[in-house]
Amino acid sequence: MTTTFEDLLRDLTPQVLGALVRRYGQFDACEDAVQEALLAAATQWPADGVPDNPRAWLITVASRRLTDQLRSDIARRRREEAFQDTSVEPPSVPDRDDTLVLLFMCCHPSLSAPSQLALTLRAVGGLTTAQIASAFMVPEATMAQRISRAKQRIRSTGVPFQLPPEDERAERLRVVLQVLYLIFNEGYTATSGDDLHRPDLTAEAIRLTRELRRILPNDGEVAGLLALMLLTEARRPARTLPDGTLVPLDDQDRRLWDANAIKEGVTLISETLARSTIGPYQLQAAIAAVHDEAPSAQDTDWVQILGLFDLLETIAPNPVVTLNRSVAVAMVQGPRAGLDLLAGLENDERMAGNHRLDAVRAHLLEKAGEVDLAREHFERAAKRTTSRPEQRYLQAQARRLRTSP
């Protein structure tokens, strides 16, 4: 199947699933039927050509698969009464796009964070179980069980197929954005394995966030998240050498950065900040924009970055923000000031065992001239990370300091 077919099927997956769930209910059965329809399309379309109305074709095939399943079930009569209509006649194709409803459903608070990630990629992203399992480096059977439990959970809790009430929508949208952000982060810096990047995941996160922005064009945080992803992903070509060695931001060849993605991201965040209430994703995007617009590491406007971090920590305080802000503080006020800020994170249980705390401390200790302590923290960070590219980089930094005069 060509990339064109794959892209089309991914775009249509949430629309087809939304149409079935709205008509029949039973998310789990509808999702299985949609997967069968996608498989049929992947087999038939390359040979027969794409139908004039591919969305209607998929809805019809999935509906027939679903009704066949219902008829063969032992509880056929009861299910037929619940569904009332199990005709194999092609259903009417609704004009509405239920992608947003599906996103809210997949990110329902009754599901665990791993289940939200997996179900979003499966139901909204159109990825297969094998693809999701590969992305998160778990056996396919394990991922299949995770997705199955998530679908059963949605069914057992009776999550309605509708947008949450107005008073819940903002909080639920926050969860949706967080899930998309986590998908992107896992793709940009894989938590384990031999590869630093998972480009398939970053591309999918950007695609889904673009779709969310299409549906919610006036939401500042949706636009901010998309800008953040674009501005961050733009640096990916320079983050590793051909042999996979990690290259830190300051040492990257900025000529390799994606100028088009930077231009789009900067334009998007500039327009958004001018008209929207400021939120954490917008501020993170603004910080990324300052980095990306600097001609060199030496030209980075750290005073502006620190000001943005100060505001970010005011509206969305968390240890990761403090960790990143410590670097900006060190660049503006000196490494000692940054280290003092890190000291407050030592007893934060959310940072327990986090290799990035040791890595940042090592970086600032080296700037402060404490080479031996810096080496110890580079070594500790290397032992704590499960990402082999990060591990190799941190070990190399420790060796460098061990052999330095």
Image (cartoon, grey):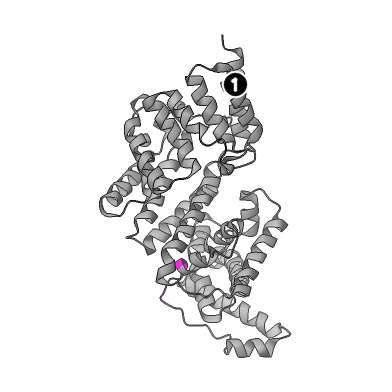
* Residue 371 locus on image (x, y percent): 55, 17
Crowding at mark 1 (Cα within 10 Å: few <14, some 14-19, many 20+): many
- Image height check: is 121 above or below 300? below
Name the residue at the top extreme: 405
* Residue 28 locus on image (x, y percent): 62, 72
- Image height check: is 226 above or below 217? above
Residue beneath the point at 61% across and 54% down: 132
If the image is split into quadrants, where does the C terminus sit?
top right
Magenta highlight range? 95-100
Residue 297 showing in the rendered view = no
Q: Is residue 216 left or right of residue 394?
A: left
Among the 4 quarters of the image, the one containing residue 27? bottom right
Residue 72 showing in the rendered view = yes
* Residue 287 locus on image (x, y percent): 37, 39
Residue type for callout 1: Arg
Residue beneath the point at 53% across and 37% down: 345
- Image height check: is 140 above or below 298? below
* Element under disc 1: helix
Disc 1 target residue: 375
Residue beneath the point at 46% across and 41% down: 321
Name the residue at the left extreme: 274
Q: In this view, does 189 lie to the left or right of 266?
A: right
Among the 4 quarters of the image, the one containing residue 250? top left
